[in-house]
Amino acid sequence: MQMQLLKERILKDGLVEDGDILKVDSFLNHQIDIRLLEEIGKEFRHQFEGKEITKILTIEASGIAIACIAARHFNVPVVFAKKSKTLNISGEVYKTSVESFTHKSTNTIIVSKKFLLPEDKILIIDDFLANGKAVIGLSRLVEEAGATLVGAGVVIEKGFQPGGERIRSMGIDLHSLAIIDSMNPENGVIFRKE
Ligand code: 5GP
């Protein structure tokens, strides 16, 4: 189920940039509309109704606010993977590398072994889904920890990029609150029909 309120906000305030980037800086990625985030959190809770979740996992920076508000609805803690600048990291962390869609660079992301435990049931949350690198990288950390991946929730999926198909074909229960079928600076955003 896509979220009408979010789609209306994207149409009103989202800016399509060249290079297939949607800017949502006025309500999600820079200035944050907490009321909208509250509804987003509620919707994620609804989509994963009945599933046991012990922790929400996201990636810094833009996933953190979304994950935190969602976590209030699940009543669980948030763990965010940090982008590490240190090359030589001790054995106290799970780590993997993730190619950044927006910066075209590769980051090592880390999570302390203290915060991902084999008994954890993890929901991954992120703001955007493009090629799927961030969500798949996070799922590798979950796997490394021996924890269970319950599913992944993203706010905006760019359905014309391959991430959604990749993640669904891996058997991950993925829910996206708005799925964009196509977009360009001239005509704006077209959502996928449900
Ligand atoms: P992926 O890893 O799926 O290729 O890309 C997802 C990550 O890249 C997200 O964490 C998000 O921060 C960033 N991203 C991808 N596409 C967009 C976009 O169109 N707009 C913005 N603001 N961020 C994006």
Image: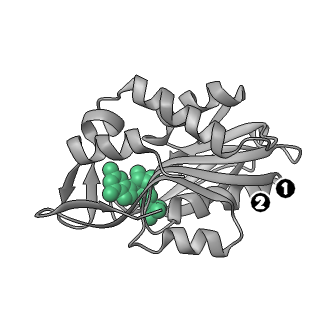
Residue positioned 62% across, 59% down in the render: 174
Q: What is the secondary structure assignment of the residue under circle 2?
A: helix
Relative to 67, 184 lies left or right? left
Residue 67, above or below 105: above
Would residue 96 be found to the left or right of residue 49 on screen? left
Classify 14 as above or below 139: above
Residue type marked 2: Glu
Q: Is mark 2 within 8 Å of ligand 1?
A: no
- Helix, strand or loop at mark 1: loop
Which residue is at 63% across, 24% downward? 72
The image shows residue 11 at horizontal and vertical percentages of: 25, 48
Left or right, 85 with reference to 115: left
Q: Position of residue 134 (x, y in %)?
A: 52, 58
Query: Looking at numbered disc 1 in the image, what kind of residue is underneath it?
Result: Gly
Residue at 65% in and 39% down: 46
Mark drawn on residue 93: none
Q: Which residue is mark 1?
A: 146
- Judged from this view, the residue extending furthest toward the front is 194
Mark pair 1, 2: CA separation: 5 Å
Q: Which mark is residue 143?
A: 2
Q: Callout 2: few (<14), some (14-19), or many (20+) C-alpha neighbours within 10 Å?
A: some
- 157 above or below 9? below
Image spot of residue 161 (x, y percent): 40, 72
The x and y percentages for residue 68 are 56, 29
User: Quadrant location of ligand 1?
Assistant: bottom left
76 or 94, nearer to the observer: 76
Which quarter of the figure has residue 95?
Answer: bottom right
Marks 1 & 2, CB-CB < 8 Å contact: yes
